[in-house]
Amino acid sequence: MTGTSGRTGRLRIVTGIAMAAALVGGAAAVALGPPLVGANAAATADTLRAAAAQSGMFFGVAASPGRLNSIVAREFSQLTPENDMKPETIAGAGGTIQNTGNADTLVNYAQTNSMVVRGHTMVWYSQAGQLQGASQSTLNTYIKNALLKWGNKISYWDVVNESLDDNNTGQRRNQWPHTLDRDANGDGDYFDASDTDYIRESFRQARQVVQQSGLTTKLCINDYDVEGLTVRGGAKNKKSDALYDIVKTYSQEPYKYIDCVGFQSHFNDNPNSIISDDLQANIQRFADLGVEVHLTELDIDDDLSNNDIGDGQAANYRKVVRACLNVAKCTGITVWGISDNESWRSSERGLLFTGSNGSYQKKSAYYAVLDELNKGRQTTSPSPSGPSPSGPSSSPSSSTSASSNPSPSNPSPSNPSPSNPPSSSPVSPPPPAGCSASVALNSWDGGFVATVRVTAGSAPINGWTVTIPLPAGASVTNTWNAVQSGTSDTVQYTNVSYNGRVAAGQSTEFGFQGTGSGTGMTAVCAAS
Ligand code: 9MR
Protein backbone atom coordinates (compact mmCIF):
# COMPACT_ATOMS: atom_id res chain seq x y z
CA MET A 1 0.00 0.00 0.00
CA THR A 2 2.90 2.28 0.16
CA GLY A 3 5.80 2.81 -2.08
CA THR A 4 8.94 4.79 -2.34
CA SER A 5 9.78 4.46 -5.95
CA GLY A 6 10.70 7.56 -7.75
CA ARG A 7 10.87 9.69 -4.67
CA THR A 8 13.95 11.71 -4.16
CA GLY A 9 15.36 11.60 -0.76
CA ARG A 10 12.23 11.04 1.21
CA LEU A 11 9.65 8.42 1.68
CA ARG A 12 6.50 9.14 -0.11
CA ILE A 13 3.46 7.14 0.71
CA VAL A 14 1.81 6.36 -2.54
CA THR A 15 -1.75 5.92 -1.77
CA GLY A 16 -4.63 7.30 -3.56
CA ILE A 17 -7.97 8.63 -3.02
CA ALA A 18 -10.18 11.01 -4.57
CA MET A 19 -12.22 13.53 -2.95
CA ALA A 20 -15.73 14.33 -3.51
CA ALA A 21 -17.45 17.50 -3.53
CA ALA A 22 -20.01 18.95 -5.65
CA LEU A 23 -20.89 22.40 -4.88
CA VAL A 24 -23.80 22.62 -7.03
CA GLY A 25 -25.12 19.91 -9.07
CA GLY A 26 -27.50 17.21 -8.44
CA ALA A 27 -27.75 16.16 -4.90
CA ALA A 28 -24.82 18.29 -4.16
CA ALA A 29 -26.79 21.46 -4.35
CA VAL A 30 -25.60 22.24 -0.89
CA ALA A 31 -25.34 25.74 0.40
CA LEU A 32 -21.76 26.54 1.07
CA GLY A 33 -21.86 26.69 4.72
CA PRO A 34 -22.37 29.08 7.53
CA PRO A 35 -23.07 32.71 6.79
CA LEU A 36 -21.17 33.32 3.61
CA VAL A 37 -19.27 36.43 4.35
CA GLY A 38 -18.18 36.55 0.78
CA ALA A 39 -21.44 35.58 -0.83
CA ASN A 40 -21.91 39.19 -1.62
CA ALA A 41 -19.32 39.54 -4.29
CA ALA A 42 -18.58 43.06 -3.25
CA ALA A 43 -17.24 41.88 0.08
CA THR A 44 -13.94 40.24 0.83
CA ALA A 45 -14.56 36.87 2.36
CA ASP A 46 -12.68 36.00 5.52
CA THR A 47 -12.91 32.23 5.40
CA LEU A 48 -11.62 29.85 2.76
CA ARG A 49 -15.04 28.38 2.08
CA ALA A 50 -16.70 31.74 1.63
CA ALA A 51 -13.91 33.03 -0.57
CA ALA A 52 -14.06 29.95 -2.79
CA ALA A 53 -17.85 30.08 -2.96
CA GLN A 54 -17.63 33.41 -4.74
CA SER A 55 -16.25 31.50 -7.70
CA GLY A 56 -18.63 28.56 -7.34
CA MET A 57 -15.87 26.41 -5.91
CA PHE A 58 -15.59 24.31 -2.83
CA PHE A 59 -12.57 24.50 -0.59
CA GLY A 60 -12.31 21.30 1.40
CA VAL A 61 -10.24 19.29 3.82
CA ALA A 62 -9.48 15.67 4.58
CA ALA A 63 -10.30 14.67 8.13
CA SER A 64 -11.19 11.91 10.50
CA PRO A 65 -13.80 12.11 13.30
CA GLY A 66 -11.17 13.04 15.88
CA ARG A 67 -10.36 16.22 13.99
CA LEU A 68 -13.86 17.64 13.66
CA ASN A 69 -13.35 20.79 15.68
CA SER A 70 -15.04 24.05 14.85
CA ILE A 71 -12.41 25.21 12.41
CA VAL A 72 -13.50 22.53 9.95
CA ALA A 73 -17.02 23.82 9.40
CA ARG A 74 -15.88 27.41 9.58
CA GLU A 75 -13.16 27.22 6.96
CA PHE A 76 -14.10 24.34 4.71
CA SER A 77 -17.10 23.54 2.51
CA GLN A 78 -16.11 20.01 1.59
CA LEU A 79 -14.98 16.98 3.54
CA THR A 80 -13.04 13.90 2.48
CA PRO A 81 -12.67 11.04 4.96
CA GLU A 82 -8.89 10.73 5.13
CA ASN A 83 -9.04 7.00 5.88
CA ASP A 84 -12.51 6.05 7.11
CA MET A 85 -14.11 5.18 3.76
CA LYS A 86 -11.27 3.07 2.45
CA PRO A 87 -12.05 -0.59 1.79
CA GLU A 88 -9.53 -1.48 4.48
CA THR A 89 -12.05 -0.07 6.94
CA ILE A 90 -15.47 -0.62 5.42
CA ALA A 91 -15.26 -3.56 3.00
CA GLY A 92 -16.62 -6.84 4.35
CA ALA A 93 -16.59 -10.27 2.77
CA GLY A 94 -17.82 -10.60 -0.79
CA GLY A 95 -18.17 -6.86 -1.41
CA THR A 96 -20.39 -6.11 1.58
CA ILE A 97 -20.11 -2.92 3.59
CA GLN A 98 -19.35 -2.95 7.30
CA ASN A 99 -17.93 -0.86 10.08
CA THR A 100 -19.15 2.48 8.77
CA GLY A 101 -19.35 4.26 12.13
CA ASN A 102 -16.57 6.76 11.50
CA ALA A 103 -17.61 7.32 7.92
CA ASP A 104 -21.18 7.98 9.07
CA THR A 105 -19.92 10.47 11.63
CA LEU A 106 -18.10 12.36 8.89
CA VAL A 107 -21.04 12.30 6.49
CA ASN A 108 -23.42 13.49 9.19
CA TYR A 109 -21.06 16.27 10.20
CA ALA A 110 -20.84 17.38 6.59
CA GLN A 111 -24.61 17.38 6.23
CA THR A 112 -25.07 19.39 9.39
CA ASN A 113 -22.54 21.94 8.24
CA SER A 114 -23.56 22.15 4.58
CA MET A 115 -20.38 20.54 3.37
CA VAL A 116 -20.04 18.44 0.26
CA VAL A 117 -18.59 14.95 0.77
CA ARG A 118 -16.08 13.15 -1.42
CA GLY A 119 -16.09 9.40 -0.99
CA HIS A 120 -12.54 8.09 -0.86
CA THR A 121 -12.07 5.51 -2.29
CA MET A 122 -13.48 2.33 -3.88
CA VAL A 123 -11.10 0.49 -6.20
CA TRP A 124 -7.49 0.86 -5.17
CA TYR A 125 -4.53 -1.45 -4.90
CA SER A 126 -3.65 -0.03 -1.49
CA GLN A 127 -5.59 -0.21 1.79
CA ALA A 128 -7.89 -2.66 0.00
CA GLY A 129 -8.61 -4.79 3.07
CA GLN A 130 -11.01 -7.60 2.24
CA LEU A 131 -11.20 -6.44 -1.37
CA GLN A 132 -7.55 -7.23 -1.97
CA GLY A 133 -7.37 -9.70 -4.83
CA ALA A 134 -11.13 -9.60 -5.45
CA SER A 135 -12.72 -10.45 -8.78
CA GLN A 136 -14.43 -7.84 -10.90
CA SER A 137 -17.74 -9.34 -9.84
CA THR A 138 -16.93 -8.74 -6.16
CA LEU A 139 -15.67 -5.27 -6.96
CA ASN A 140 -18.96 -4.57 -8.70
CA THR A 141 -20.91 -5.71 -5.65
CA TYR A 142 -18.82 -3.46 -3.49
CA ILE A 143 -19.23 -0.49 -5.82
CA LYS A 144 -22.99 -0.89 -5.73
CA ASN A 145 -23.12 -1.24 -1.96
CA ALA A 146 -20.86 1.74 -1.37
CA LEU A 147 -22.85 3.98 -3.71
CA LEU A 148 -26.17 2.96 -2.22
CA LYS A 149 -24.99 3.20 1.37
CA TRP A 150 -24.75 7.00 1.26
CA GLY A 151 -26.56 7.84 -1.97
CA ASN A 152 -26.66 11.53 -2.72
CA LYS A 153 -25.06 12.42 0.58
CA ILE A 154 -21.87 11.76 -1.30
CA SER A 155 -21.44 14.20 -4.15
CA TYR A 156 -18.22 12.79 -5.60
CA TRP A 157 -16.81 9.30 -5.30
CA ASP A 158 -13.29 8.26 -6.17
CA VAL A 159 -14.27 5.12 -8.01
CA VAL A 160 -10.73 4.32 -9.12
CA ASN A 161 -7.64 5.55 -7.34
CA GLU A 162 -3.96 5.54 -8.30
CA SER A 163 -4.17 3.25 -11.28
CA LEU A 164 -0.92 4.46 -12.84
CA ASP A 165 2.67 3.53 -12.20
CA ASP A 166 5.35 5.67 -10.55
CA ASN A 167 8.43 7.13 -12.18
CA ASN A 168 6.71 8.70 -15.16
CA THR A 169 6.53 5.48 -17.12
CA GLY A 170 3.04 6.22 -18.45
CA GLN A 171 2.15 2.60 -17.68
CA ARG A 172 -0.52 1.23 -15.43
CA ARG A 173 0.54 -0.42 -12.21
CA ASN A 174 1.00 -4.15 -12.34
CA GLN A 175 -0.42 -5.27 -9.01
CA TRP A 176 -4.04 -6.13 -8.34
CA PRO A 177 -6.59 -4.92 -9.53
CA HIS A 178 -4.56 -4.60 -12.73
CA THR A 179 -4.21 -8.34 -12.80
CA LEU A 180 -7.87 -8.32 -13.86
CA ASP A 181 -6.89 -6.56 -17.09
CA ARG A 182 -6.40 -8.35 -20.38
CA ASP A 183 -5.04 -6.80 -23.55
CA ALA A 184 -6.80 -9.16 -25.94
CA ASN A 185 -5.29 -7.92 -29.16
CA GLY A 186 -1.89 -7.13 -27.70
CA ASP A 187 -1.82 -3.55 -28.94
CA GLY A 188 -0.56 -2.19 -25.63
CA ASP A 189 -3.76 -0.67 -24.29
CA TYR A 190 -6.94 -1.86 -22.62
CA PHE A 191 -9.34 0.34 -24.54
CA ASP A 192 -10.49 -2.04 -27.25
CA ALA A 193 -13.89 -3.66 -27.03
CA SER A 194 -12.25 -7.07 -26.84
CA ASP A 195 -9.96 -5.99 -23.99
CA THR A 196 -10.80 -6.38 -20.32
CA ASP A 197 -10.18 -3.23 -18.33
CA TYR A 198 -10.96 -3.01 -14.64
CA ILE A 199 -11.16 0.77 -14.92
CA ARG A 200 -13.84 0.55 -17.58
CA GLU A 201 -15.72 -2.21 -15.76
CA SER A 202 -15.65 -0.42 -12.42
CA PHE A 203 -16.90 2.81 -13.90
CA ARG A 204 -19.46 0.97 -15.98
CA GLN A 205 -20.88 -0.56 -12.82
CA ALA A 206 -20.81 2.73 -10.95
CA ARG A 207 -22.53 4.54 -13.81
CA GLN A 208 -25.21 1.87 -14.01
CA VAL A 209 -25.95 2.08 -10.29
CA VAL A 210 -26.08 5.88 -10.43
CA GLN A 211 -28.47 5.78 -13.35
CA GLN A 212 -30.70 3.02 -12.10
CA SER A 213 -30.98 4.56 -8.65
CA GLY A 214 -31.43 8.14 -9.83
CA LEU A 215 -28.35 9.34 -8.00
CA THR A 216 -26.55 12.55 -8.82
CA THR A 217 -23.25 11.39 -7.37
CA LYS A 218 -20.37 12.17 -9.69
CA LEU A 219 -17.82 9.52 -10.53
CA CYS A 220 -14.15 10.41 -10.38
CA ILE A 221 -10.72 8.99 -11.07
CA ASN A 222 -7.88 10.22 -8.90
CA ASP A 223 -4.08 10.08 -9.05
CA TYR A 224 -0.85 11.84 -8.10
CA ASP A 225 2.08 13.16 -10.14
CA VAL A 226 -0.38 13.97 -12.90
CA GLU A 227 -0.59 17.68 -12.21
CA GLY A 228 1.70 19.19 -14.83
CA LEU A 229 2.01 18.70 -18.56
CA THR A 230 5.71 18.33 -17.87
CA VAL A 231 7.93 17.10 -15.08
CA ARG A 232 11.16 18.66 -13.89
CA GLY A 233 13.48 19.35 -16.78
CA GLY A 234 10.62 19.79 -19.21
CA ALA A 235 10.06 16.16 -20.20
CA LYS A 236 6.48 15.18 -20.94
CA ASN A 237 4.49 14.00 -17.97
CA LYS A 238 3.67 10.56 -19.31
CA LYS A 239 1.66 9.64 -16.25
CA SER A 240 -0.58 12.62 -16.85
CA ASP A 241 -0.85 11.74 -20.54
CA ALA A 242 -1.89 8.20 -19.62
CA LEU A 243 -4.54 9.52 -17.25
CA TYR A 244 -5.70 11.86 -19.99
CA ASP A 245 -6.16 8.92 -22.36
CA ILE A 246 -8.24 7.08 -19.76
CA VAL A 247 -10.42 10.08 -19.00
CA LYS A 248 -10.75 10.97 -22.65
CA THR A 249 -11.87 7.45 -23.50
CA TYR A 250 -14.28 6.86 -20.64
CA SER A 251 -15.77 10.33 -20.32
CA GLN A 252 -16.86 10.46 -23.96
CA GLU A 253 -19.32 8.49 -26.09
CA PRO A 254 -20.02 5.64 -26.13
CA TYR A 255 -19.10 5.32 -22.47
CA LYS A 256 -19.73 8.60 -20.65
CA TYR A 257 -18.73 6.99 -17.36
CA ILE A 258 -16.29 9.48 -15.85
CA ASP A 259 -17.50 12.85 -14.52
CA CYS A 260 -14.48 14.16 -12.74
CA VAL A 261 -10.75 13.83 -12.34
CA GLY A 262 -8.73 14.42 -9.19
CA PHE A 263 -5.18 15.71 -9.27
CA GLN A 264 -3.99 14.77 -5.80
CA SER A 265 -1.44 17.60 -5.76
CA HIS A 266 1.04 16.40 -3.17
CA PHE A 267 3.74 18.80 -4.30
CA ASN A 268 7.31 18.19 -3.23
CA ASP A 269 10.87 18.00 -4.54
CA ASN A 270 10.39 14.78 -6.40
CA PRO A 271 11.05 15.48 -10.11
CA ASN A 272 7.58 14.23 -10.95
CA SER A 273 5.83 16.04 -8.09
CA ILE A 274 6.82 19.61 -8.77
CA ILE A 275 4.64 22.63 -9.39
CA SER A 276 5.30 23.18 -13.06
CA ASP A 277 4.45 26.32 -14.99
CA ASP A 278 2.03 24.33 -17.13
CA LEU A 279 -0.24 23.24 -14.27
CA GLN A 280 -3.05 25.49 -15.47
CA ALA A 281 -2.68 24.28 -19.04
CA ASN A 282 -2.97 20.70 -17.89
CA ILE A 283 -6.05 21.41 -15.79
CA GLN A 284 -7.49 23.09 -18.86
CA ARG A 285 -6.67 20.10 -21.04
CA PHE A 286 -8.76 17.79 -18.84
CA ALA A 287 -11.49 20.39 -18.37
CA ASP A 288 -11.83 20.62 -22.11
CA LEU A 289 -12.97 17.00 -22.09
CA GLY A 290 -16.03 18.23 -20.20
CA VAL A 291 -15.12 16.73 -16.83
CA GLU A 292 -14.74 18.61 -13.58
CA VAL A 293 -11.20 18.86 -12.28
CA HIS A 294 -10.40 18.92 -8.57
CA LEU A 295 -7.16 19.30 -6.66
CA THR A 296 -8.01 16.60 -4.19
CA GLU A 297 -5.18 16.18 -1.68
CA LEU A 298 -3.26 19.42 -1.78
CA ASP A 299 -0.20 19.91 0.36
CA ILE A 300 2.99 21.71 -0.57
CA ASP A 301 6.38 20.97 0.94
CA ASP A 302 7.56 24.19 2.55
CA ASP A 303 11.08 23.72 1.23
CA LEU A 304 10.94 23.24 -2.50
CA SER A 305 14.60 24.06 -2.75
CA ASN A 306 15.00 22.16 -5.98
CA ASN A 307 11.83 23.48 -7.46
CA ASP A 308 12.51 27.09 -8.22
CA ILE A 309 8.92 27.99 -8.86
CA GLY A 310 7.57 30.54 -6.44
CA ASP A 311 9.26 32.33 -3.61
CA GLY A 312 8.22 29.96 -0.92
CA GLN A 313 5.27 28.01 0.31
CA ALA A 314 2.79 30.87 0.34
CA ALA A 315 3.72 31.85 -3.21
CA ASN A 316 3.45 28.26 -4.31
CA TYR A 317 0.00 27.91 -2.77
CA ARG A 318 -1.00 31.09 -4.52
CA LYS A 319 0.21 29.75 -7.82
CA VAL A 320 -1.65 26.45 -7.47
CA VAL A 321 -4.91 28.07 -6.37
CA ARG A 322 -4.64 30.55 -9.22
CA ALA A 323 -4.20 27.75 -11.77
CA CYS A 324 -7.45 26.18 -10.59
CA LEU A 325 -9.35 29.45 -10.43
CA ASN A 326 -8.37 30.26 -13.98
CA VAL A 327 -10.11 27.16 -15.33
CA ALA A 328 -13.89 27.33 -15.05
CA LYS A 329 -14.31 23.58 -14.65
CA CYS A 330 -11.74 23.36 -11.87
CA THR A 331 -14.49 23.30 -9.28
CA GLY A 332 -12.80 22.48 -6.03
CA ILE A 333 -9.64 22.26 -3.98
CA THR A 334 -9.14 20.05 -0.96
CA VAL A 335 -6.18 20.26 1.39
CA TRP A 336 -4.96 16.97 2.83
CA GLY A 337 -5.41 17.85 6.48
CA ILE A 338 -5.83 20.90 8.66
CA SER A 339 -2.50 21.37 10.33
CA ASP A 340 1.14 20.54 9.67
CA ASN A 341 1.46 18.82 13.01
CA GLU A 342 -1.34 16.40 12.19
CA SER A 343 -0.48 15.78 8.55
CA TRP A 344 0.62 12.51 6.96
CA ARG A 345 3.76 14.40 5.96
CA SER A 346 4.25 16.59 9.00
CA SER A 347 7.99 16.91 8.45
CA GLU A 348 7.33 18.84 5.26
CA ARG A 349 4.94 21.29 6.93
CA GLY A 350 2.76 21.33 3.85
CA LEU A 351 -0.58 22.67 5.09
CA LEU A 352 -2.26 25.98 5.93
CA PHE A 353 -2.26 25.82 9.73
CA THR A 354 0.12 24.82 12.49
CA GLY A 355 -0.83 23.51 15.91
CA SER A 356 -2.75 20.52 17.13
CA ASN A 357 -5.87 19.35 18.91
CA GLY A 358 -7.98 22.19 17.62
CA SER A 359 -5.54 24.86 18.67
CA TYR A 360 -4.49 26.05 15.24
CA GLN A 361 -2.68 29.09 13.92
CA LYS A 362 -2.98 30.35 10.38
CA LYS A 363 0.23 30.32 8.36
CA SER A 364 1.18 32.81 5.67
CA ALA A 365 0.15 30.12 3.19
CA TYR A 366 -3.38 30.40 4.58
CA TYR A 367 -3.50 34.13 3.96
CA ALA A 368 -2.09 33.69 0.48
CA VAL A 369 -4.80 31.16 -0.40
CA LEU A 370 -7.53 33.34 1.09
CA ASP A 371 -6.30 36.35 -0.85
CA GLU A 372 -6.04 34.44 -4.11
CA LEU A 373 -9.52 32.96 -3.68
CA ASN A 374 -10.91 36.42 -3.06
CA LYS A 375 -9.60 37.57 -6.42
CA GLY A 376 -11.88 35.07 -8.09
CA ARG A 377 -11.63 33.51 -11.48
CA GLN A 378 -9.79 35.30 -14.26
CA THR A 379 -10.58 33.24 -17.30
CA THR A 380 -10.51 35.42 -20.35
CA SER A 381 -12.09 32.89 -22.63
CA PRO A 382 -14.50 30.22 -21.53
CA SER A 383 -13.68 26.63 -22.17
CA PRO A 384 -15.20 25.59 -25.47
CA SER A 385 -17.10 22.83 -23.76
CA GLY A 386 -18.38 25.23 -21.18
CA PRO A 387 -19.38 24.44 -17.67
CA SER A 388 -21.58 21.45 -17.17
CA PRO A 389 -25.18 22.40 -16.58
CA SER A 390 -25.10 20.72 -13.23
CA GLY A 391 -21.71 22.00 -12.29
CA PRO A 392 -20.83 24.90 -10.14
CA SER A 393 -21.19 28.32 -11.56
CA SER A 394 -18.21 29.12 -13.66
CA SER A 395 -18.88 32.74 -14.13
CA PRO A 396 -17.03 35.05 -11.91
CA SER A 397 -19.02 37.39 -9.80
CA SER A 398 -19.01 40.97 -10.86
CA SER A 399 -16.35 41.99 -8.46
CA THR A 400 -14.19 38.96 -8.85
CA SER A 401 -14.10 39.16 -12.58
CA ALA A 402 -13.05 42.72 -12.36
CA SER A 403 -10.56 42.11 -9.66
CA SER A 404 -7.83 40.16 -11.11
CA ASN A 405 -4.32 39.47 -10.44
CA PRO A 406 -3.81 42.02 -8.65
CA SER A 407 -6.33 44.43 -10.03
CA PRO A 408 -6.47 48.10 -9.34
CA SER A 409 -9.66 47.59 -7.36
CA ASN A 410 -8.23 44.72 -5.41
CA PRO A 411 -4.54 45.06 -5.00
CA SER A 412 -2.84 42.26 -3.24
CA PRO A 413 -0.51 43.66 -0.66
CA SER A 414 1.12 40.31 -0.25
CA ASN A 415 1.80 39.80 -3.90
CA PRO A 416 2.50 43.05 -5.64
CA SER A 417 3.33 42.60 -9.26
CA PRO A 418 5.79 44.96 -10.81
CA SER A 419 3.93 44.55 -14.05
CA ASN A 420 0.64 45.62 -12.59
CA PRO A 421 0.83 48.17 -9.84
CA PRO A 422 -2.34 49.51 -8.29
CA SER A 423 -3.95 52.25 -10.31
CA SER A 424 -3.46 54.64 -7.48
CA SER A 425 0.28 54.60 -8.11
CA PRO A 426 1.35 57.91 -9.57
CA VAL A 427 2.85 56.32 -12.64
CA SER A 428 2.99 58.39 -15.78
CA PRO A 429 2.49 56.44 -18.96
CA PRO A 430 5.82 55.30 -20.26
CA PRO A 431 6.71 55.94 -23.87
CA PRO A 432 5.96 53.14 -26.31
CA ALA A 433 8.71 50.63 -26.35
CA GLY A 434 9.51 47.30 -27.80
CA CYS A 435 8.71 43.84 -26.63
CA SER A 436 9.52 40.32 -27.67
CA ALA A 437 7.58 37.08 -27.38
CA SER A 438 8.60 33.46 -27.21
CA VAL A 439 6.50 30.32 -27.45
CA ALA A 440 6.92 27.17 -25.35
CA LEU A 441 4.98 24.20 -26.60
CA ASN A 442 3.56 21.08 -25.03
CA SER A 443 2.09 18.70 -27.57
CA TRP A 444 0.21 15.47 -27.59
CA ASP A 445 -1.37 13.51 -30.34
CA GLY A 446 -3.79 15.90 -32.03
CA GLY A 447 -3.38 18.85 -29.72
CA PHE A 448 -1.07 21.28 -27.98
CA VAL A 449 -0.81 23.97 -25.35
CA ALA A 450 1.33 27.00 -26.06
CA THR A 451 2.68 29.21 -23.30
CA VAL A 452 3.73 32.58 -24.65
CA ARG A 453 6.12 34.76 -22.72
CA VAL A 454 5.95 38.48 -23.44
CA THR A 455 9.04 40.41 -22.39
CA ALA A 456 9.36 44.19 -22.35
CA GLY A 457 12.47 45.73 -23.86
CA SER A 458 14.53 48.45 -22.26
CA ALA A 459 11.50 50.52 -21.35
CA PRO A 460 8.23 49.62 -19.66
CA ILE A 461 5.19 48.92 -21.83
CA ASN A 462 1.52 49.66 -21.23
CA GLY A 463 0.07 46.95 -23.42
CA TRP A 464 1.01 44.42 -26.03
CA THR A 465 -0.20 42.59 -29.09
CA VAL A 466 1.28 39.26 -30.11
CA THR A 467 0.78 37.92 -33.62
CA ILE A 468 1.25 34.22 -34.30
CA PRO A 469 0.89 32.49 -37.67
CA LEU A 470 -0.43 29.02 -36.90
CA PRO A 471 0.80 25.95 -38.75
CA ALA A 472 -1.57 24.63 -41.41
CA GLY A 473 -4.47 22.71 -39.91
CA ALA A 474 -3.95 24.08 -36.40
CA SER A 475 -6.82 25.80 -34.69
CA VAL A 476 -7.12 27.54 -31.31
CA THR A 477 -9.79 26.25 -28.97
CA ASN A 478 -9.09 28.15 -25.79
CA THR A 479 -7.06 31.07 -24.48
CA TRP A 480 -6.18 32.35 -21.03
CA ASN A 481 -4.65 35.59 -19.79
CA ALA A 482 -5.07 37.30 -23.18
CA VAL A 483 -7.81 38.44 -25.55
CA GLN A 484 -7.84 36.34 -28.67
CA SER A 485 -8.66 37.36 -32.21
CA GLY A 486 -9.00 34.64 -34.83
CA THR A 487 -8.74 30.90 -34.37
CA SER A 488 -6.77 29.70 -37.40
CA ASP A 489 -4.21 30.96 -39.93
CA THR A 490 -2.89 34.02 -38.14
CA VAL A 491 -4.12 34.71 -34.60
CA GLN A 492 -3.58 37.80 -32.49
CA TYR A 493 -3.51 38.20 -28.76
CA THR A 494 -3.70 41.40 -26.77
CA ASN A 495 -3.21 41.84 -23.07
CA VAL A 496 -6.04 41.74 -20.56
CA SER A 497 -6.50 44.35 -17.85
CA TYR A 498 -4.04 42.90 -15.41
CA ASN A 499 -1.06 41.97 -17.56
CA GLY A 500 -0.64 44.79 -20.05
CA ARG A 501 1.83 46.79 -18.04
CA VAL A 502 5.20 45.15 -18.02
CA ALA A 503 8.25 46.76 -16.48
CA ALA A 504 11.45 47.09 -18.48
CA GLY A 505 13.06 43.70 -18.92
CA GLN A 506 10.21 41.94 -17.12
CA SER A 507 7.84 39.32 -18.52
CA THR A 508 4.29 38.15 -18.35
CA GLU A 509 2.69 35.03 -19.81
CA PHE A 510 -0.47 33.97 -21.52
CA GLY A 511 -1.47 30.66 -23.02
CA PHE A 512 -3.68 29.00 -25.52
CA GLN A 513 -4.72 25.52 -26.45
CA GLY A 514 -5.22 24.20 -29.93
CA THR A 515 -5.99 21.20 -32.03
CA GLY A 516 -3.64 19.93 -34.70
CA SER A 517 0.07 20.51 -34.47
CA GLY A 518 1.62 23.66 -33.05
CA THR A 519 5.16 22.75 -33.97
CA GLY A 520 7.30 25.57 -35.32
CA MET A 521 5.20 28.50 -34.14
CA THR A 522 6.89 31.85 -33.75
CA ALA A 523 5.46 35.00 -32.22
CA VAL A 524 5.87 38.69 -33.01
CA CYS A 525 5.25 41.23 -30.26
CA ALA A 526 4.20 44.86 -30.67
CA ALA A 527 4.07 47.12 -27.64
CA SER A 528 1.70 49.96 -27.00
O1 9MR B 1 -3.35 10.50 4.77
C1 9MR B 1 -3.53 9.09 4.74
C2 9MR B 1 -2.72 8.45 5.84
O2 9MR B 1 -3.26 8.81 7.09
C3 9MR B 1 -2.71 6.96 5.68
O3 9MR B 1 -1.83 6.41 6.63
C4 9MR B 1 -2.27 6.60 4.28
C5 9MR B 1 -2.27 5.13 4.07
O4 9MR B 1 -1.92 4.79 2.80
O5 9MR B 1 -3.14 7.20 3.34
C6 9MR B 1 -3.07 8.58 3.39
O6 9MR B 1 -3.90 9.14 2.39
C7 9MR B 1 -3.48 8.91 1.05
C8 9MR B 1 -4.72 8.92 0.21
O7 9MR B 1 -5.65 7.98 0.68
C9 9MR B 1 -4.39 8.63 -1.24
N1 9MR B 1 -3.39 9.53 -1.75
C10 9MR B 1 -2.19 9.67 -0.96
C11 9MR B 1 -2.56 9.99 0.49
C12 9MR B 1 -1.30 10.19 1.29
O8 9MR B 1 -0.54 9.02 1.33
Image (cartoon, rainbow, N blue to C red):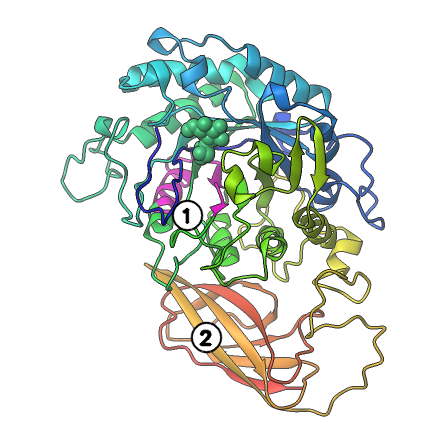
Ligand 1 closer than 8 Å to label 2 CB = no
The residue at 49%/45% (across/down) is 265
264 falls in the magenta region: yes
On the question of residue 455 being in view, the answer is yes
Indicate whether 334 appears above or below 484.
above
Q: Is residue 263 left or right of residue 355?
A: left
Q: Nearer the viewer, residue 352 or 210?
A: 352
Quarter-of-image position of residue 469? bottom left
Q: Quadrant of the N terminus?
A: top left
The disc labelled 1 sits on which kind of residue? Answer: Val
Q: Quadrant of the C terminus?
A: bottom right
Mark 2 residue element: strand
Q: Nearer the viewer, residue 374 or 84?
A: 84
Residue 266 location (% of width, % of height) = 48, 44
Magenta residues? 243-267
Residue 186 location (% of width, % of height) = 14, 40
The disc labelled 2 sits on which kind of residue? Answer: Val
The residue at 56%/26% (across/down) is 216
Dot 1: within a 10 Å radius of its alpha carbon, few (fewer than 14), some, or many (20 or more) residues? many
The residue beneath circle 2 is 439
The residue beneath circle 1 is 226
Residue 396 location (% of width, % of height) = 71, 52
How far separated are the C-alphas under marks 1 and 2? 23 Å
Indicate whether 517 appears above or below 290.
below
On the question of residue 294 being in view, the answer is no
Residue 373, disc: none
